[in-house]
Image (tube, grey):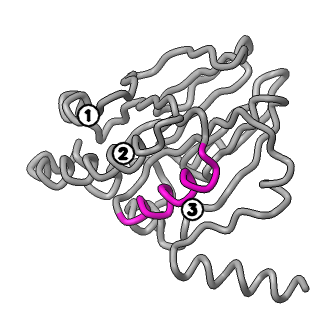
Amino acid sequence: MKFIKDLYERLLFMFDYPYISKELLDEIKGPILLHISDTPVDIYGYIFRIIEILKPQYIVHTGDMADNIKLEIYKYKMDSYCKGVAKLIDGVEKNKFSKIYYVLGNHDDYETVSNLTDRGIILNDGILTIEGYTFSVSHYYKENLNDVDFNLYGHSFEPSHYKKGATVGLNGLLNINIIDLSNKRVFQLDYPSGTDTSRGMKLKRIGL
């Protein structure tokens, strides 16, 4: 049975379709918060399918919304960035049940995101209170956050996910993080194969 399950999961990955286990679907109670970060354009469909299946009440994107563009470095690619971000925002905001936070990264443009979103909340970083839990949200990892329940960030492979005291740190570049806000339980999904290559990060393993 394990062989069949592994084969099925690999086949889904080949077609950029997320494998969401029956255990997750059975055990998660909700409300659900979905945390993503550093998303290249070619994985948007994968993200949209997860949103369609889970229907999260909250979505937090911690920056670099069209990460393959690297807008901070290649400013002449603004048109490509606008097209990519428009596609992402359109797909994410189709889920009318979600409250959405866009936490901008170094490769994002505030004016573009502001003009394209209908109902997203745009931040550079900050502290949010959601369903009674406190969240530090930032594109970059922040230290010494002992008074929050969750620390959500992206940008770099380090640091990884962690638990320090009462604070759970989740790196949205490493995994798609799913938080069950009824009990603080965290589930994680892999990004599709090739995501780090699309980000331009696979070889150097650094934040860009």
Assess whether mark 1 and mark 2 are in contact (beta carbons under 8 angstroms). yes
Of the pair 112 and 50, the residue shown nearer to us: 50
Residue 65 is tagged as 2
Marks 2/1: CA–CA distance: 9 Å
Q: Mark 3: few, some, or many residues within 10 Å (few <14, many ≥20)?
A: many
Label 3: which residue? 191
Residue 41 is tagged as none
Label 1: which residue? 113
Q: Provide residue 164's location: percent of width, then percent of height.
A: 80, 27
- On screen, 16 above or below 85? below
Snapshot quadrant of residue 114:
top left
Per the rendered image, the range of residues in magenta is 42-55
Disc 1 secondary structure class: helix
- On screen, 27 above or below 131? below
Q: Is residue 144 left or right of residue 43?
A: right
The amino acid type, in three-letter code, at marker 3 is Tyr
